[in-house]
Amino acid sequence: ALGVHPGSRVALRLGNSPAFLLAWLGAVTARAIAVPINPQLTLDETRAILAHAEPSALVVEPDWVEEARKLTAALPGLRVVLVAGGDAAREGPGLLPFQALLEAPPLPLSRPGPEDVATFIYTSGTTGRSKAVMQTHQTYVLTGQAFPWWLGLTAEDRLLTALPLFHINAQAYSTMGTIGAGATLVLLPRFSASRFWEQAAASRATEFNALGAMLAILLKQPPTAAERAHAVRICYTAPVLPAAMHEACEARFGFHLKYGYGLSESTFGPVVPRGRPWKPGGMGRARQHPELGVINEVRVVDPAGNELPPGVVGEIVLRNPAVMKGYFKEPALTAEALRGGWFHTGDSACRDTDGDFFFVDRLKDLIRRRGENISSVEIEDVLRAHPAVLECAAIPVPSELTEDEIKAYVVFREGAGAEAAELFAWCAARLARFKVPRFLEVREALPHTPTGRVAKYQLRQEAATPKGPRYDREALPVPPPG
């Protein structure tokens, strides 16, 4: 009746809520393809995704009904809008209360195949262009079975997430991991640093997932009684924290940090194995499945695809059954990413003789200066350790010497600050000379992708047009010796 059939797309413009979970799980169970959309996107941005995905149905919250009406007029393939929550009597042409579906008798369904596409995940666009990852039922099932095993979770656990449900982390790790363990999911509408520990304690959460700067932001908060009055014993996070921040988190908050590397394109990257000590900077080893054994291979390769020896930096490539089917409507990009039977991540790393992997940088974010390859992550780790710095980023900018100069961006903690000369000196005391940034720009905030990562592509676009005070290290007065 809704025009939704196996392979049809159902778009979900919903925040973190039970309605999202019902709509997402319902769509994929019916062999439709769910298309979650970031509800923070503008009308034009949403229209572009809908035009690309071509859904036949759209699920929205009541406060977005009028915008949805405009979209149905502009997109002839969009036949019905389901309204989740609010006034169930609010109907009209093309509108249907979500509750009506929940109250309808169940329909006979055929079982989806392992390699059938379950969800389109629009990448967060750290390179500036968002793509629709076609992720399969197999990926979600394997991840749901394996995530509890990787972390040692049971049915007694309560998995908390404040990460957006339109992202693979909250879908595959938190939601499917909860189902796989027979555990309880604690779903927060959004991340609030000031309320997080109170929410964790009130929900009796025992595990939570963090991304990006979440843990750094929590460390910058004033100490409270709530931060040790919770039941959380594990935090699963990425990227890997600097050793000092890792130790500070565990000591202050009383949980154990667990690192894993995953992407929208594959949830099976390296993970720190249970029962093994963490190596500072390490992402762990190729994660496997608790019953199927070795199903995942992780390598570090050169541009020709040749595996590199330990200690040599190259691109991370993955081969496992939890790799995406491809990018929707992007055959050339799919062929490039999946060439030779391996998924090419675009990230650089090295491995040690034990088989542990160590992240270096996004390949596009490596900085070439004075004949050396420099990781922006290394510079950011040093700046982030300064007591006045809340958040930071480092990018390459053009140099008159034909290589790169380094530009750093910093956001200060509320009520804090530092002189540019102090920050340059801080870096110089902790980094080799060629790694010290040439330029520094102070911002009130940095641009972020929907998943909380700094949108470096935007910073690169804005590098020549500062939005805050900008400093050139070579133009500053030389500090007196000693």
Image: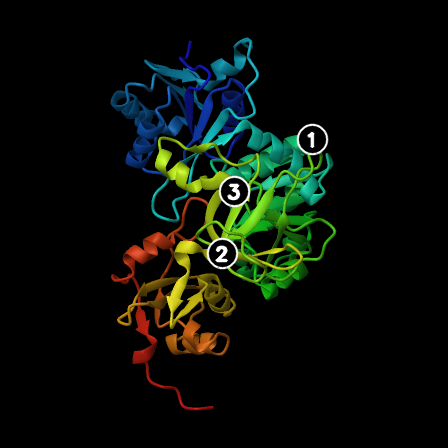
Counting residues from the start of the chain, the first of labels 1 and 3 encountered is: 3
Residue type at mark 2?
Gly
Nearer the observer, 474 or 1: 474
Counting residues from the start of the chain, the first of labels 1 and 2 encountered is: 1
SS class of the residue under badge 3? loop
Q: How many other residues sit within 10 Å of disc 2, few (<14), some (14-19) or many (≥20)?
A: many
Tell me what residue is drawn at x 32 percent, y 37 percent. Answer: 42
Q: In front of the other: label 3 or label 2? A: 2
Nearer the observer, 469 or 128: 128
- Quadrant location, the N terminus: top left
Q: Residue 71: x percent and y percent? A: 29, 25
Label 3, label 2: how far apart the Cα atoms are: 30 Å
Q: How many other residues sit within 10 Å of disc 3, few (<14), some (14-19) or many (≥20)?
A: many
Q: Residue 378: x percent and y percent? A: 49, 65
Q: Mark 3 points at which residue?
A: 163
Q: Mark 1 points at which residue?
A: 182
Q: Answer whether labels 1 and 2 touch (C-beta < 8 Å).
A: no
